């Protein structure tokens, strides 16, 4: 069964229980030195959520794929960063649909998080996003895989000045980065783009 083990950071399939090394109380892959949680490929089908978890794991961002789901203390700055990021992507989608969208952020007091509303809203956003992709006839698995490929070649911002979003929470495009070939995939499925 060891031949089915893999590293989620570099996808190295030579990972065995014997090959894993312990450094600073963390389990690390001997190929890339990334932190690993052993998972078996054929145990379950991986989802888009798991792939985003792989991305977060690679860049030392919290995630519920490799770190047990459950309550966390999340800094307000990170919450605001993620919300601005969601708005940025929504505006990009609206622009592509021929709509200029303006959104403002005004924080209410107190700033306690209603985790039920947040969970419901995020799942609904994901569901509506996938539904819109269905309505438009988009080849979602192929598009997602191409975006994942490109995103996994990015780097974590070390200084806020490196980030267009002005944050070390950001993951940035390194020199020579190749963007996802969205148009190429769409052409494969018949779009004239």
Image: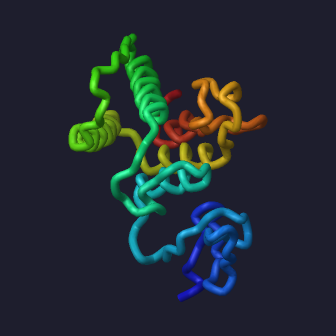
The reply, left or right, for residue 146 in relation to residue 10 is left
Q: Quadrant of residue 158?
A: top right
- Counting from the top left corner in percent of width and height, residue 90 is at 39, 25
Is residue 186 shown left or right of residue 21?
left
Q: Residue at the spot x=42%, y=20% of the render?
A: 91
User: Does the rendering let one see residue 134?
Assistant: no
| Res 28 quadrant in image | bottom right
Locate residue 94, reporting x and y percent: 38, 20
Question: Relative to residue 171, is residue 1 drawn left or right?
Answer: left
Q: Residue at x 37, y 59 (%)?
A: 69
Asked if residue 51 can be seen in this view, the reply is: yes
Q: Nearer the viewer, residue 112 or 146?
A: 112
Q: Nearer the viewer, residue 65 or 13?
A: 65
Q: Residue furthest right?
A: 175
**Is residue 17 positioned above or below 172 on the image?**
below
Taking the spot 49% from the left edge, 37% from the top edge, the residue there is 186
Find residue 96 and report its image quarter.
top left
Q: Position of residue 159 (x, y in %)?
A: 70, 32
Number of marks present in the image shown: 0
Which residue is found at the position 63% from the left and 83% from the top? Answer: 16
Q: Is residue 32 above or below residue 120?
A: below
Q: Position of residue 43 (x, y in %)?
A: 41, 77
């Amino acid at each position: 069964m060891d031949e089915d083990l893999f590293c989620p950071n570099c996808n190295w399939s030579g990972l065995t229980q014997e090959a894993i090394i312990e450094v600073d109380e963390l389990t690390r892959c001997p190929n890339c030195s990334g932190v690993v949680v052993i998972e078996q490929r054929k145990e379950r089908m991986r989802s888009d959520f798991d792939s985003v978890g792989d991305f977060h794991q690679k860049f030392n961002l919290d995630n519920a794929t490799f770190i047990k789901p459950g309550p966390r203390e999340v800094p307000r700055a990170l919450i605001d960063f993620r919300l601005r990021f969601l708005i940025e992507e929504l505006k990009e989608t609206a622009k592509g649909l021929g709509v200029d969208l303006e959104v403002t952020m005004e924080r209410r007091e107190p700033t306690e998080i209603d985790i039920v509303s947040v969970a419901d809203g995020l799942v609904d956003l994901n569901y509506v996003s996938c539904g819109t992709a269905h309505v438009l006839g988009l080849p979602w698995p192929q598009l997602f895989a191409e975006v994942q490929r490109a995103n996994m070649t990015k780097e974590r911002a070390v200084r806020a000045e490196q980030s267009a979003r002005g944050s070390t929470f950001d993951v940035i495009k390194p020199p020579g980065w190749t963007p996802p070939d969205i148009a190429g995939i769409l052409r494969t499925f018949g779009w004239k783009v």
